[in-house]
Amino acid sequence: MLIKSPRTAVILLLLVSLIWGAEFTLIDMAIDTIPTHTFNAIRFLLAGVSLIPLLWFKRHQLQGIRWLRLCGACALLGFLLFISFYTQTEGMHYTSVSNAGFITGLAVPLVPLLGFLLFRNRAPIAIWIGMIVATAGLYLLTVGDKLEFNYGDTMVMVCAFGFAIHILLTGRFVASFPVVPMSILQLLAVALYSTIAILLGPDPAFYHPGSTPLSWQDLAMNPIVISAILIAGVFGTAYAYWAQSACQQRLESHKVALIFATEPVFACITAWLILDENLGTLGLLGAGLIIAAMLISELGDRKHNVKLEPLDQTTSATVE
């Protein structure tokens, strides 16, 4: 399918952000039934398999691939995604969907900070201002009038760091390897790591300890679990990859980044509509500061290209 107008591209990318934001609520409900590692193993296996047909259209890119180096890079990228999605999904047991959505979005201002610390990448002043504003927003959102972080907030914060490092490394690897095979292999790597974690862990694979024992047949009949896996696996990854790649032919990178910055907004809206979550005054102020930080970091310096890497399950951008 060819995207013929910028307006169509905007609509398709807003749908991606809606899916990413809404899936927080679905996942939050699904992990009440299915363990985190099992959910992620099925989700990423489905996502990786869903992208395999794209190899037919990109088959010319398969010639001359340095497979050993590609597999090594994907093993590292997949491990970062494994840690990120585990801490994000597990953290949602202990924090609200709204908090999880907004804290995950902190990967945006973390990218320039970690890029400078790890690779000495220089970022414009607007990026640093955005980082400071986002930190203040995170404090109000997760701490508020208390002097301690929620355990779930801390885990999701680890997820934001993991996503940011993944974005930076993907930006370095993507110049050497074709995107479609690299995306498929790292998604399958996450499924493999999650399966190993299931086998090595002491807990049952298909239900939480202390709850009613379930089999895979029981999970297959659970509409919430199946809906969460299908939406997060197929639409939140396979569709998002196609839409992002196709739409960036019609939209400038900074416009794509701005559209993706709406993900935590959708996460908050769906949590309010479905779970009746309320952030409170300080939480709303903190959320507003985080959105402002995203806009500052993305729009503050349009002279720099913003590179959005496919399949990063977060509002993410790499400033070069």
Image (spheres, rainbow, N blue to C red):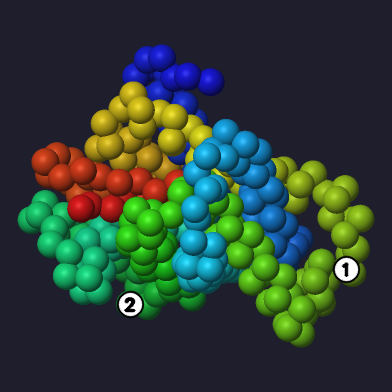
226 and 283: which is toward the camera: 226
Q: Position of residue 20 (x, y in %)?
A: 51, 44
Figure check: 86 above or below 97: below
Secondary structure of the residue carrying numbered label 2: loop
Q: Residue lying farthest top?
A: 4
Residue 172 as seen in the image, left or right of residue 199:
left
Mark 1 belongs to which amino acid?
A: Thr
Q: Nearer the viewer, mark 2 or mark 1?
A: 1
Q: Residue at x 37, y 40 (%)?
A: 260
Figure check: 24 above or below 58: below
144 and 137: which is toward the camera: 137
Q: Position of residue 265 (x, y in %)?
A: 40, 42
Disc ID at residue 147? 2
Q: Earlier in the sequence, mark 2 or mark 1?
A: 2
Q: Residues within 10 Å of mark 2 (few under 14, many from 20)?
A: few
Q: Residue lying farthest front?
A: 64
251 and 109: which is toward the camera: 251
Residue 111 can be seen, yes or no: yes
Figure check: 166 above or below 59: below
Q: Residue at x 28, y 53 (%)?
A: 318
Q: How far apart in space, not on screen, are marks 2 and 1 (Cα)?
A: 37 Å
Disc ID at residue 23? none
Secondary structure of the residue carrying numbered label 1: loop
Q: Residue at x 28, y 63 (%)?
A: 110
Q: Residue at x 90, y 56 (%)?
A: 218
Residue 264 as seen in the image, left or right of residue 65:
left
Query: On the image, numbered disc 1 is attached to which residue?
Result: 212
Q: Would you say the residues marked 2 and 1 are in contact, meaning their CB atoms lie under 8 Å apart?
A: no
Q: Position of residue 24 (x, y in %)?
A: 55, 50
Residue 37 can be seen, yes or no: no
